[in-house]
Image (spheres, rainbow, N blue to C red):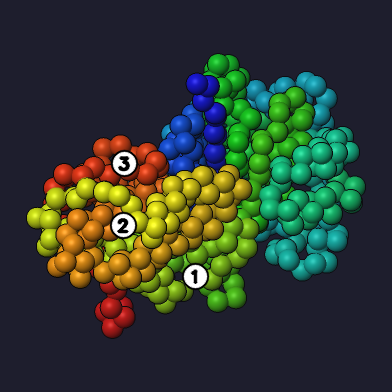
Amino acid sequence: MIKNKFYVTTPIYYVNDTPHIGHAYTTILADVLARFHRALGDDVFFLTGVDEHGQKVQQAAEKRGLAPQQHCDDLAPRFSSLWKELGISNDDFIRTTEERHIRVVQSILQKVFDNGDIYQKEYEGLYSVAEERFITEKEAESGQFREVKVLKEKNYFFRMSRYQERLIRYIEENPGFIRPEHRKNEMLGFLRQPLTDLCISRPKSRLAWGIEIPFDRDFVTYVWFDALINYISAVGYLSDEEKFKRWWPASAQLIGKDILTTHSIYWTTMLFSLELPLPEVIFAHGWWLMGESKMSKSLGNVIKPLDLIEQHGVDAVRYYLMSEMNLGSDANFTLENFIKRYNSDLANDFGNLLNRVSGLIGKYFEGVIPGQGDLSEADREIAAQASTLGSRVEELVRQYKVDAAIDQIMELIRVVNKYMEVQAPWKLAKTDLPAAGRVLYVATEALRIAAVLLRAVMPDKAGRVLEILGVQASGLVWGGLESGVKLPIFPPLFPRIELEKV
Ligand code: MSP
């Protein structure tokens, strides 16, 4: 069987501060997609990393009285170790100060210079120090840019304008390329204005912390031109042809809506110039807000993922972030919501079903999973719903509707909890023990199927459920649960969070 390829990327995060929930969100989302695709049998490559050059990082280093490289060496592991704590299954972690990346950036600059898409000119314009780029007058008028000043400078420019028409055509001909739909329209709107060329250098006299331009040592590369290249330098572009052919183009490039222009315009035109195919999908998700504003370091309103993990466990955090945000829209982060969702979905529904079936199997069957027997009408309804769950979830995940996919799984759990109440196997056990066994088998098997699918979101806890159920096979076909397996005694997986404790 030929395997499908799935190459997924996250933005590479600036190392100007320790990671917060916003960064964790994109990375967990990529992880959930990677795990789903691995479970589907796809060949997966999952890339994340850190963006270490540019003014923001240089300033952060200065503030701490450190050399930029020292600062980066200190911060990069904070990201990679947080990803470990969050159960992130990335295949690579790229740092833009690594030799393997720098070499490729310089080769690309030379290549694009040689093919005539980079030229030098003197430019005078409005420059936003905060954004680290020249802005148009219209942008300046919008008032969204901080620290704007007039700057006159000789610099190198990338001929982005040359590719404007081609990009518009590409976006129109590939409606699933920029997602969700309203972001695609936003970009087409942006492209109605003439596209200006992109300034891709910074004189060393103004900014020293960057990749040196190979054909003019007085300049370093603009941080975005450097950073975007990580998506191909990590998979062997200009260094390992076979690897590159295997993975590029990326299947899904996940980003926040704040960096949509850099990805769908800068990055795509760079790829055009290099004559490389564009990624299949660029997906821009919304923001996690605190009240009305974006959660961000500069606003000082960040939630630290580690604090939440310490208190409530990794999988509860992963579950909350994935189920609460409708992919593409913004979502509000509140501790109250987090606890509500945890208690209702994980403690009351999922955890409770496990406790109930295992408790009753313990009480009436000496802890040994009973046989299935002949299914009744009500049993068959559960079996039917559970049997189609996998394909329904797969379909939703392929459409990037992760929250809806999770809801489908939780819906099965809710239905099974109701079924338990109606069937009342604890009553049946007194008059018809095989019938009670049948009901418990059906409920436990549905729980098994739900747990198999939830593993992408909660690898640890859902994996633990399967371990408890003694499941070897993790297929989605009805009947995978083995009768005769003895269940162990285990502590509750999702103890309720009592509000007064918070
Ligand atoms: N270094 C650039 C990206 C270069 S990619 C070639 C950058 N880094 S960043 O550290 O500012 O983080 C960017 C990403 O973090 C956002 O695009 C988004 O994916 C995520 N988030 C940061 N804050 C966020 C929220 N408050 N909510 C959701 N995601 C956010 O830009």
Instruction: Give the number of the mark in front: 3 or 1.
Output: 3
Instruction: Answer with the quarter of the image where residue 161 lies.
Output: top right
Above or below — where is 310 with respect to 474? Answer: below
Q: Nearer the viewer, residue 315 or 59?
A: 315
- Marks 2/1 in contact by CB < 8 Å: the verdict is no
Residue 269 in percent (x, y) is at 77, 36
- Residue 295's tag is none
Instruction: Answer with the quarter of the image where residue 128 lies.
Output: bottom right
Identify the residue at image location x=28%, y=58%.
439
Identify the residue at image location x=60%, y=42%.
253
Q: Nearer the N terminus, badge 3 or badge 1?
A: 1
In the image, taking residue 300 as reference, residue 307 lies left or right, namely left
Residue 462 appears anywhere in the view: no
Label 3: which residue?
480
Residue 295 in percent (x, y) is at 54, 66
Instruction: Give the number of the mark in front: 2 or 1.
Output: 2
**Callout 1, which amino acid?**
Phe
Q: Nearer the N terminus, badge 2 or badge 3?
A: 2
Residue 296 in percent (x, y) is at 54, 64
In the image, taking residue 195 as reference, residue 323 lies left or right, namely left
Instruction: Answer with the quarter of the image where residue 127 lies.
Output: bottom right
Residue 243 in percent (x, y) is at 53, 20
Q: Nearer the viewer, residue 417 or 383?
A: 383
- Residue 333's tag is 1
Dot 1: element: loop
Above or below — where is 172 with respect to 215? Answer: below
Q: Nearer the N terminus, badge 2 or badge 1?
A: 1
**Callout 2, which amino acid?**
Ala
- Residue 443's tag is 2
